[in-house]
Amino acid sequence: MNNNKLRDHVGRILHESAIRSFSFSLQGANVNGPELAEIGRQVLKGSIAVRVDASLESSGEFDYLSNTLFFKSDNPDRGTILHESIHALLHHHKCTKTTDITHEVAAYLAEVIYYLREGLIRRERFQKSFTLGSTQSIYQEAIRLIDKHQILRKSVYLKWGDYQGLRNAIKAHPTYIKPQWQ
Ligand SMILES: [Zn+2]
């Protein structure tokens, strides 16, 4: 897939019905389907660029300086596309009154809401305990939060204290061990 095909792919995914019904807010960060579709429109018209960069350490990255969504592969999975698009959305909304860790919480929540809605992950797999610092433990905390607050069914607002478990799981992951996040 070349960069243009990937751009069209990303733009289309952000208009899907499973994403259109998204609606949740964290302290200082709001995520909803129509605004994600707007990010999709900006991708399609090229005002947000999409590029493949095989040298990336993670599967994706949104670079706010160049306003570019980077993906390690030319066929990124939908969860990765959604995750990075949430970073783009929060940047475009100038959600600067919130923290980097809240942006990450929003991105993981969106990713897991999508996986659950589409039947791409199964709750039963997440009933055992996972080592803190693994991606599975992040997903597990996200599932707990989604079920506790019924995020699949209604629009919710989560206070800082509500998502402490998910914050801790993210902060323990090697990608996110950053002094300013402690
Ligand atoms: Zn992220």
Image: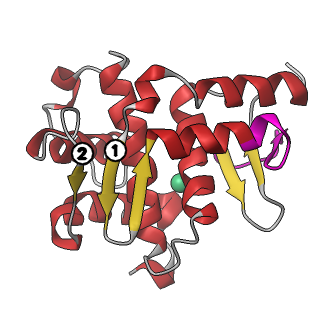
Q: Is residue 149 left or right of residue 48?
A: left
Quadrant of image for the C terminus: bottom left
Disc tally is: 2
Which residues make up the magenta segment? 42-59
Q: Position of residue 134 (x, y in %)?
A: 37, 47
SS label for mark 1: strand
Residue type at mark 2 is Ser
Residue at 51%, 32% in the rendered image: 79
Residue type at mark 1 is Ser
Q: Position of residue 146 (x, y in %)?
A: 20, 42
Residue 75 visible (yes or no): no
Q: Tell me if label 2 and label 1 are in contact, CB under 8 Å.
A: yes
Q: Residues within 10 Å of mark 1 (few under 14, many from 20)?
A: many
Marks 2/1: CA–CA distance: 5 Å
- Mark 2 sits near ligand 1, with its Cβ under 8 Å away: no
Q: Which mark is residue 155?
A: 2
Q: How is the image coloured?
A: secondary structure
Q: Is residue 118 above or below residue 131?
A: above
Q: Is residue 149 left or right of residue 100?
A: left
Residue 91 visible (yes or no): yes
Q: Position of residue 11 (x, y in %)?
A: 69, 30
Q: Position of residue 108 (x, y in %)?
A: 41, 47
Q: Nearer the viewer, residue 169 or 1?
A: 1
Q: Image quarter for residue 87?
A: bottom right
Residue at 53%, 59% in the rendered image: 175
SS label for mark 2: loop
Quadrant of image for the N terminus: top right
> Which of pointers 2 and 1 lies earlier in the amino acid sequence?
1
Mark 1 sits on what residue?
23
